[in-house]
Image (tube, helix red, strand yellow):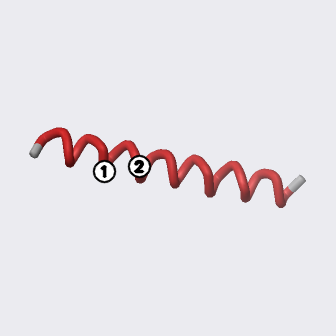
Amino acid sequence: MEEGVKENYRLALQLKYNLSHSCLFSAH
């Protein structure tokens, strides 16, 4: 179970990172 939580956390961080970068690129 802990492994699944870690994976979800990693995916969530990656998604957040991608979204923030998309916003930065859109702003340019």
Q: Residues within 10 Å of mark 1 (few under 14, many from 20)?
A: few
Residue ID for mark 2: 18
Residue toward you, 13 or 26: 26
The structure residue drawn at horizontal position 25% and vertical position 41%, both measured from the top left corner, is: 23
- State the residue lying farthest toward the left: 28
Q: Number of numbered discs present?
A: 2
Q: Is residue 17 left or right of residue 20?
A: right
Q: Position of residue 17 (x, y in %)?
A: 41, 53
Q: Secondary structure at mark 1?
A: helix
Q: Is residue 14 left or right of residue 17?
A: right
Q: Is residue 21 left or right of residue 9?
A: left
Residue toward you, 24 or 9: 24
The structure residue drawn at horizontal position 72% and vertical position 56%, both measured from the top left corner, is: 7
Q: Position of residue 20 (x, y in %)?
A: 32, 47
The structure residue drawn at horizontal position 38% and vertical position 43%, both measured from the top left corner, is: 19
Residue 7 circle label: none
Q: Amino acid at mark 1?
A: His
The structure residue drawn at horizontal position 30% and vertical position 50%, both measured from the top left corner, is: 21
Residue ID for mark 1: 21
- State the residue lying farthest toward the right: 1
- How far is disc 2 from disc 1 in space, using C-alphas? 5 Å
Q: Is residue 5 left or right of residue 21?
A: right
Disc 2 and disc 1 in contact, CB within 8 angstroms: yes
Q: Amino acid at mark 2?
A: Asn
